Amino acid sequence: MVELKAIDRRENLVKKLRDPDYRESYLHPKKRTRREVLKRLYKPVFENKKIVVAQVICAITGGLIPVLSAFIMRFIVESIQGLLSQNVSTVGEARSMLLSILVYCLLFFVLSAITIQIEMRTYSWFMNIRIESLGKAFHKMTKIELGLREDASFLNSVGDLSAAVGSNNSGMEGIYHEIFKIGKSVVATLILSIILARVNPLIPIIALVSIIINAYSRYSYSSYHHSLMPKFQEVGRKSSRVSNISMDFNYGKDVRVYKMRGAFENLANHLIKKNIKLQIKLRIKRLKTTIPVTIALVLIDLGIAAVLVVNYFDGRIDAAVLVMILSIVGIYSMQLKEIGRVIAYVYEESMYIDYLYDFLDASLSSKGGQDFPMELKNKVDIEFRDVWFRYPGSDNWVLEGLNLQIKTGESVALVGVNGAGKTTLISLLTGLYQPEKGQILIGGIDIASLSQDSLNKLIAVVLQEIEPIALTIAQNVAVSLGDIDKELVEESLKKAGLWGKIESYKNGIDSMMLRVVEDEGVVLSGGENQKLAIARALYRDSAEILVLDEPTSALDAIAEEQIYRDFESLIKDKTAIFISHRLASTRFCDRIILLNGGKIEQIGTHDELVSRPGLYKDMYDAQASYYKKEAADEDIDERKIFEEDYIEKGEGVSYG
Amino acid sequence: MDNTINSNKIPTKKIFSALFGLAVKLRPQLLLVTILSSILQSGNVLLTIWIPKIILDGFDKNWPLAKFIQVIIILAVVKLLVNYFEDISFQLNNHEQNIFTRKVDLHFSQKITKVKYEILEDPDALDLKQRALAPIEYGYLHWIFENLQGILAAIIAIVGIITILLNFSIGLFVGVTLISLIAFAIEGKLSSLAIKFQQELVPVNRRYNYYVGILTDEIHQKEHRLYGLSDVVVERLLDYNKEIVSKLRDMNVKVGNAQTVSTFINIFSRLILYSYSGLRVLGIMGAKIGLGDFSILVGANENYGNSLKTLGKNIIETINLINVIEPVIAFLELEEMDEEYASESKRHIHLKKKDDNKKPKKPGRLKQLTFENVSFTYPKTDRKILDNVSFTLNEGEALAIVGRNNAGKSTIVKLICRLFEPDSGRILWNGVDIREFSYSDYLDELACVFQDFKLFPLRIWENVASTWTKADIDAEENTIPLDIKAKLDKVIDKVELTEAINKLPSGLNTWLEKSLNDDATDFSGGQKQKLAIARAIYKDASVAILDEPTAALDPLAESEVYGHFADLIKGKTAIFISHRMSASRFCDRIIVLEDGKITGNDHHSKLINENDLYRSLYEAQAKYYE
């Protein structure tokens, strides 16, 4: 046996991250400033010159529009006043006024058109970035340690990823679009500030104060909102769970027959009430924070107006200027309000993005990166050395110091009562979970040092529950879109006993499955899905180890027997591990391993195990009792026999 | 069956009235708040038009400084109040919309528990549900009310502005209206184009969401890691990304063009109005007006255009949304089962209508259950799953039904439970067609454990004593009604769960659903099965029906379950279905189903010799134990 190397073996993350403090510091190692978050968010933007230019042009053209609107009144009023003093009486004489109106309209149209076109044509570019990040984040979620994925407290620490990448108008994309739009307000505010400062330098200062007040009040509201978030999420999670279950058609029979509709209504109503209570809290806070802001903003408008009116009476400005400035002030305060809003918005949303980056950056796999050495391919002895395991968040050991050896080429059955740890053992062997203590070796190499990829190449698993997805049959078998060995697919399907059915389809193995993509898609029964899963495992013909987890539970007796009959040819000379609670299957295997209470209780061939007293014999007898040969007397009450058998648990009864 | 899913589209008017009906029924406050906020919103618009006029008129009238300041302060206070109330009404509106959406969600899930069961097995119903869930989840229903509020506010504002315009000149009003209407029409037309694009995106989005769902759901997590399934899914997603983004881009280009055109028309109307008003101030083209009037004309025009635009946008959006929520309304219109009365048979004229039959009959304890020439084909399929099946089950008898997969075993259970109705033939309970009983009374006589039984996300005792369930999520412990405690304990003891439940800190009060309560327990498959059996025992029904109750169990658990079964059926009438041929041996009689027909109906000892299918099924398993 190759001595295992300690290198590249990583810590058991699932176990380590169970500690809340460590988890927090591992997932969120450094506190990014908001600026750093934005810098990273805008990296792809700055790399695209076209978008940057578009953004700048849009800000300028869009920013000039409100300025123009503010000035037009002044121009018109001025030229009207000029004309009034000239006492014009025909349209021709009013030409200068009409001309300035025409120029204004033309300019306004050109600026608007440019702004609209740029905005509409760049929108999808930002969406694309967001969707790409969504793909990355969700893809990563499917690759992190399964133990982490199933740990609710870990997921809570990761935060709400869909808040960052889930929609067009929040998180990432929300910030992109808002900042894109706010450029206009910033340009407009700058220009208007310069103009207004010349009238009265106090005005821009007052304006700045108004932005700060507005942004602060929004921020304090949103941080309150934030503090309520966990409660909202809790209620939301519960509500959606209750609503999912009550909308699940699979509950339809039991809900009706046991008359549970009222119970669901009660549950949902409780949660709705809780949600309403929270909402009211939040809205009251909102109204409380808006009172001072509304007052402050109106006072500021009022103050500016008062300053101007005083100036007018001082004779420092005339009516035309006053009109212009009053309309500027209206436009100005709108822009200020908008800027305040966006600052608060970006501040809040960038927090979700911070969390997203933390998740994307964190290394969340306990596996090493080594490939399984090719020269060991024919030497895949499996060894469990003192393996301890419990599921995240649970205190009960599922495996307690398990020791087990399986030789290359051996076929082994894992049996045991429900909850004995059969599936868990397989999950550990395939690298889905890491043992908390102990080691698992294949060909003498600790699998913790192997990459998941190389383990997957080595071991093909038929999972207990399988639901094919909306791809073609061949794609489902090969788990690949292109690059499919069609002959191998056919062969695997034949071996799995599904070829007859698939051959009958018009498109054969290229038929689309499910009705998601094609209305006429293929829908298989539960048993056929299991056969498809077997085909999928067989397609991986490079795998030296074959694991079948309850592959026949949905099949009837005859179909089950067929599979068993073919089983020996399926596994050929591969190492095979077969899980079943139907002991029938176990007779094919070289050895049977009986798990009980997280430990191996018995090991031996079928014949050995049935001949000595123990749990295996009890289980076998329990099943066999129903098949025992007819008693000579046909009038015997079958039911009575059953009840007696049950009471005696088969002791002292002979079978066949 | 033609009554299940109707593929005909519901007319828009009907969707509208159904939506209003929903609002009135679920949250009438929403309608009130909608009206209130439209009034405040339009009031604010009109105020914005009037304020500059008041000030400018002040200049014309040479107001003294004190008067100016007085007026400005009054205006500021009024504006402040209106703003603040608008904000409050906005908040209220959001609040009501949120509650409304939640209530709709609840209403919808309740509907699923009320519709005729056969509908739930129709794949089209599942599809309809999926299509209906998106608009509920995205809040499209309340969005419609938001739009209606916008429409109402725009109409009020428009009426106000029209009065102002009419004050100046009818010609002006006509001119401005004409131009605005052109803008309205063009924008409407182009918006519908955008909507068409959006509709095209719907199926793409649905598929996209399906694949995202594969990434996030629980059942595929192992495959993602062991087979790299997610790599394939992500590759698929990238294709959809491209499709969605390019479609969106196309749509945005069109929308952008529409907006550009409508901006042009808007500007054109502004050009005319400014020129006209300017000339009026100069005394050309009509009576001379003051600068205040000039500003009001300009403001009115601006807001007139905006209001018309809002109106157009909201109307089109509403029509679009109405189409989008069609599946919701269609689902809510599905036929419900009648629980209190006998079924109104669709196919059997000989059954009396419920009007003639004021009081449905009481089923009473079972003496004899008879299938009389029952045939049944699942809706939308061709295969006769049951073909002229007749058999009788007598009180105290245990009957097993065996056959290969899809032989129609579970269908018999569903027919007995009245989840489906036979196409022809009758099922008689003590000689009376089961459809003549009140469904609720009838159910009390049945104790079923379905093949795919489900426990509920409630406390343990609430699952067992289903008739007593309160489902109060906040209630602390000790909520078990005292009078049922003894019976509960007895039943739990019978299924041998007492020890396991006593180990739990909250005992019978423990929740079965982790996501609803942190202290919840996660029972193993076998324990759940036992609970399901306990639930059936608790009912004291006159017939027990067990469909494949041991598929997921190990041999010991299985033999235990059979033990409970023996207990459960002691002195009771029972029907037992299993692939495990062994199980059939302890029944009084076995029915062998083959291709929808009964090919054997006898004792095990007879069938093993006389029935080929039975023998081969039995031997396929038995040989392992020889």
Image: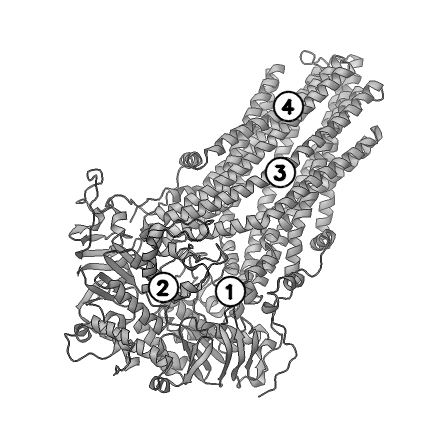
Real-space Cα separation, disc 2 to disc 3, in angstroms: 50 Å
B323 with respect to A208 (left or right): left
Q: Nearer the viewer, mark 1 or mark 3?
A: 3
Q: Nearer the viewer, residue B509 or B540?
A: B509
Q: Position of residue B539 (x, y in %)?
A: 29, 55
Q: Nearer the viewer, mark 4 or mark 2?
A: 2
Q: Secondary structure at mark 1?
A: helix
Q: Nearer the viewer, residue A422 or B272?
A: A422
Label 4 packing within 10 angstroms: few (<14), some (14-19), many (20+)? some
Residue A286 - label: 3
Same chain for marks 4 and 2? Answer: yes
Which residue is label 2 attached to?
B529
Real-space Cα separation, disc 3 to disc 4, in angstroms: 25 Å
Q: Nearer the viewer, mark 2 or mark 1?
A: 2
Same chain for marks 2 and 3? Answer: no
Q: Secondary structure at mark 2?
A: helix
Q: Amino acid at mark 1?
A: Gln
Q: Position of residue B153 (x, y in %)?
A: 55, 28
Q: Nearer the viewer, residue B68 or A460?
A: B68
Q: Residue at x 41, y 46 (%)?
A: A265
Real-space Cα separation, disc 2 to disc 1, in angstroms: 25 Å
Same chain for marks 4 and 1? Answer: yes
Mark 4 or mark 1, which has the lower sequence index? 4
Q: Are marks 3 and 4 in contact (CB under 8 Å)?
A: no
Residue B47 - label: 4
Same chain for marks 2 and 1? Answer: yes
Report in which chain the residue with disc 4 lies: B
Q: Quadrant of the C terminus of chain A?
A: bottom left
Residue B221 - label: 1
Q: Quadrant of the N terminus of chain A?
A: bottom right
Mark 2 or mark 1, which has the lower sequence index? 1
